[in-house]
Image (cartoon, rainbow, N blue to C red):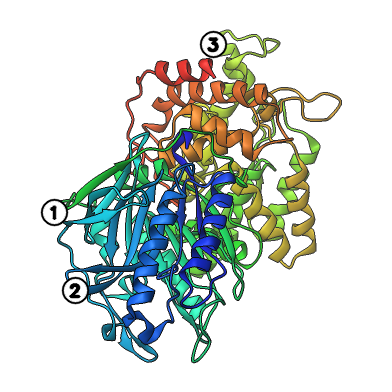
Amino acid sequence: MQNGFIKTAAIAPEIRVADPVFNREQMVEQMTKAAAKGAKLIVFPELCLSGYTCGDLFLQEKLLTEGEEQLRILVDASRDVDALVFAGTTWQENGKLYNVMAAFCHGELLGVIPKIHLPNYGEFYEHRHFTPGNRQVVDVEFVDLDGNSSWIPFGTDILFQCETMKSLVVGAEVCEDLWAPQPPSIRHALAGATVVVNGSASNEVVGKSAYRRNLVVGQSARLFCGYVYATSGPGESTTDVVFSGQNLIAENGTLVAEAKRFRNGITYGVLDVEKLVAERRRNTSFGPMENEGYELVEFSLDVEETVLGKVSPSPFVPADGKEQTERLEEILSIQSTGLRKRLEHTRCRYAVIGISGGLDSTLALLVTARAFDSLGLPREGISAVTMPCFGTTDRTYQNACVMSKAVGATLREIPIRESVRSHFKDIGQEESVHDVTYENAQARERTQVLMDVANQLGGLVVGTGDLSELALGWATYNGDHMSMYGVNGGVPKTLVRHLVRYSAETCGDSALQKALLDVLDTPVSPELLPPEEGKISQKTEDLVGPYELHDFFLYYVLRYGFSPEKIYRLAKAAFMGVYEDAVILHWMKNFYRRFFSQQFKRSCLPDGPKVGAVALSPRGDWRMPSDACSRIWLDEVEAL
């Protein structure tokens, strides 16, 4: 439960229809097992104590009274279980029978949530036996196993808040309620619920599993919530229908876990309620808060460290397979469409790119070629300018030339050594002193050349810098920091690699493919220091740290605003066996230091397209003062 994580369990236990004693025994066993595995929120299916398919047996007094007794035993069995549990059962009140979810924790019944929308179609005739619930919360009497009487809330508008993790607020709905035009979960979320549970008995027919999955995942997305869906398994009657036990756990539009169908069992999933709160905080269309008429019931759980599942080390990179291919193609389309609009608006038929043979300029060249193709412009209008200087190696130079020719751009070589030396002479800089002036003079000279060439052609300079470099400030102010349109400004370095590799695999040109693959194998470098024995001497990741770590930090800092402590915990899980904890901490400190100190470069960025959920444009996603203090973040890193 630390850092907002909570392990949940959706359970489809083995049951026997109309045998509450057997069903309770199975539920106690599974509940205890799930809690022992660290689950703090446990959900059972609809009418699990009796079985959903009892039919007119629901009108038998014996079944109902036995169900009441077994509920008392089940609640009592939770005394030593550190979890909030929801179980489907029947409930009699004022001569009416209700289909409810009973919520209990540590041996105490906390509340009863009745089903509102009762199906009365196909093989389901719930109106024959049950009365619909309503929103109004009333107090009803419950007599526990020891004979003690207490009054508990009964109604749909009940939320359960954890005293030891205030961001964990749980609401409940029952099966068909989710299928209705206005599910109770909408109100629950607007009233503050960060997690919604659903005890269901949804039968299986061809095609329904996909619909059910989409429904649960979609509801979690529109409500920015976690959704735990537990449904009946094969133990229900198969007189007319079959139940599959397709338990589902979703978080804000992402399927966290899904059970294999047609079997009983427990499905586990870890939810991050802090992430959900952060999403709601960012999205001002969520709300306003509407909790009138709701009753808030508090419960308490032990604060323990939740064992995290798999954490992706590359949060910016889509999963492998068809989804990744589609996403990479979409990103390239976004980049090229942005540039296309700028070229159209400025009536430019020429684009100028500084081509170095590195990853970023390679991607910019590929994107520009796409933009020209979409406009019907000849690719000869792309002026690919290589500007060799003190740090240029033959490897990157040759790759730059091959790629430029392969895409059909006009290759132009403009050496800048003598221009930089003249500048050194003007300012009194010794060429033998390889300091920041030595490096930045080259970067600024290259930018000046590109701007002037663009003026000659009546074109625009396409920027090559990526999102990771902007985050770290790894750009020369008014050097490679500046352009007329930055196509890579929304693409982090880890994603640049995948886009270039995808282009290599799909380009259909052997010479271009060979050059692109070699670019991928070339160390990332600005090549501003003289090479050693013809090889790159200045490796960016040796200086600022591994980009895969910085991109990981960047994603969680910008996307969710997580604290350093939480990001460190996630990073340890994601990079286990790759980086030692001390290494992660070292580069995390460097990330925060650079991120804050280099904001002034981001405050005056050229235009460029946003491609994902994270961006650093000062006009859009990230508005930060250039002189903000990093103290509280660095203090927390130091304390880890």
Query: Is 85 on the left or on the right of 237, as rendered?
Result: left
Residue 95 is tagged as 2
Residue 258: x and y in percent read 56, 64
Q: Which amino acid does label 2 sit on?
A: Gly
| Disc on the earlier residue, 1 or 2 | 2
Query: Is 157 on the left or on the right of 85, as rendered?
Result: left
Q: Which amino acid does label 3 sit on?
A: Ile
Label 2 or label 3, whichever lies nearer to me, is 2
- The residues tagged by marks 1 and 2 sit, at their Cα atoms, a distance apart of 25 Å
Q: How crowded is mark 3: few (under 14 residues within 10 Å), some or many (20 or more)?
A: few
- The residues tagged by marks 2 and 3 sit, at their Cα atoms, a distance apart of 95 Å
Residue 427 is tagged as 3
Choose top left, top right, bottom left or bottom right for residue 313: top right
Q: Is residue 17 above or below residue 553?
A: below
Q: Would you say residue 192 is visible in this rendering? A: no
Label 1 or label 2, whichever lies nearer to me, is 2
Residue 576: x and y in percent read 69, 36
Choose top left, top right, bottom left or bottom right for residue 548: top right
Residue 293 is tagged as 1
Q: Residues within 10 Å of mark 1 (few under 14, many from 20)?
A: few
Check disc 2 and report its element: helix, strand or loop. Answer: loop
Query: Residue at position x 66%, y 64% from top?
Result: 321
Check disc 3 and report its element: helix, strand or loop. Answer: helix
- The residues tagged by marks 1 and 3 sit, at their Cα atoms, a distance apart of 74 Å
Q: Which amino acid does label 1 sit on?
A: Gly
